[in-house]
Image: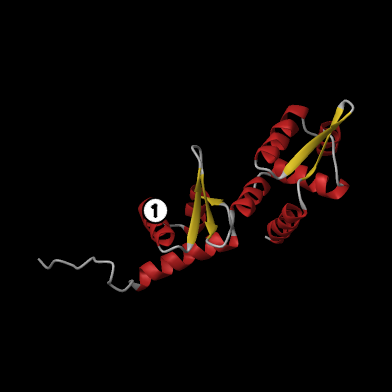
């Protein structure tokens, strides 16, 4: 029986390179993708996908944002703010909340609830999520809180992310 050299210096096999290329391109075309969605789209087994994700992360080609409940995969050039925007836009309701705020400039909880035809508690959850991530801010005027995008930098990142997500 012959022992194989499995050191880091060995060249990639064609199959390995092909799989890694597929994983990387899927992440580039769908930043913020989650593991199971990536597995479904690539058709790779759990072990193979986990291996290639670890190798891509080790070589700096991708960035992984891990929380206690989920991990999202991004191309290496995505910064924290952009990752937060993409994370929110991947949720349909959150994306709709942002779209209404962008369209009107400012919005109240009542306005968002009526325009989106969603319960106030649902809208409030997503607005709070956007506030926590620093994407929107609220200003109380009288008995209403008016929500708006926090800065022009965030506004440009949202518009860019919305354009990418609608072109898919």
- In the picture, residue 160 is in which quadrant? bottom right
Between 81 and 120, the residue placed more toward the observer is 81
Between 74 and 35, the residue placed more toward the observer is 74
- In the picture, residue 96 is in which quadrant? top right
Residue 163 in picture, x, y percent from top left: 73, 60
Classify 133 as above or below 54: above
Name which residue lies at 86% across and 35% down.
111
Residue 122 in picture, x, y percent from top left: 72, 31
Residue 71 in picture, x, y percent from top left: 50, 46
Residue 90 in picture, x, y percent from top left: 64, 48
Q: Residue furthest top?
A: 143
Q: Residue furthest left?
A: 1
> Under tag 1, what secondary structure?
helix
Classify 142 as above or below 12: above
Name which residue lies at 72% across and 52% down.
154
> Which residue in the protein does label 1 denote?
50
In the image: residue 164, left or right of residue 14: right
Label 1 packing within 10 angstroms: few (<14), some (14-19), many (20+) = some
């Amino acid at each position: 029986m012959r022992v194989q050299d499995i050191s880091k210096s060995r060249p990639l096999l064609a199959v390995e390179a092909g799989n890694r290329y597929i994983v990387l391109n899927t992440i580039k075309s769908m930043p913020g993708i989650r593991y199971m969605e990536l597995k479904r789209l690539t058709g790779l087994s759990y072990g193979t996908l986990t291996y290639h994700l670890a190798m891509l992360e080790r070589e700096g080609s991708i960035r992984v944002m891990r929380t206690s409940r989920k991990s999202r995969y991004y191309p290496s050039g995505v910064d924290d703010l952009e990752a937060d925007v993409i994370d929110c836009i991947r949720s349909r309701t959150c994306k709709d909340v942002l779209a209404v705020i962008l369209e009107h400039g400012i919005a109240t909880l009542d306005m968002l609830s009526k325009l989106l035809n969603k319960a106030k508690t649902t809208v409030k959850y997503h607005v709070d999520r956007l506030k926590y991530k620093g994407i929107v801010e609220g200003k109380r005027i009288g008995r209403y809180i008016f929500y708006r995008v926090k800065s022009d930098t965030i506004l440009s990142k949202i518009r860019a992310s919305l354009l990418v997500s609608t072109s898919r």
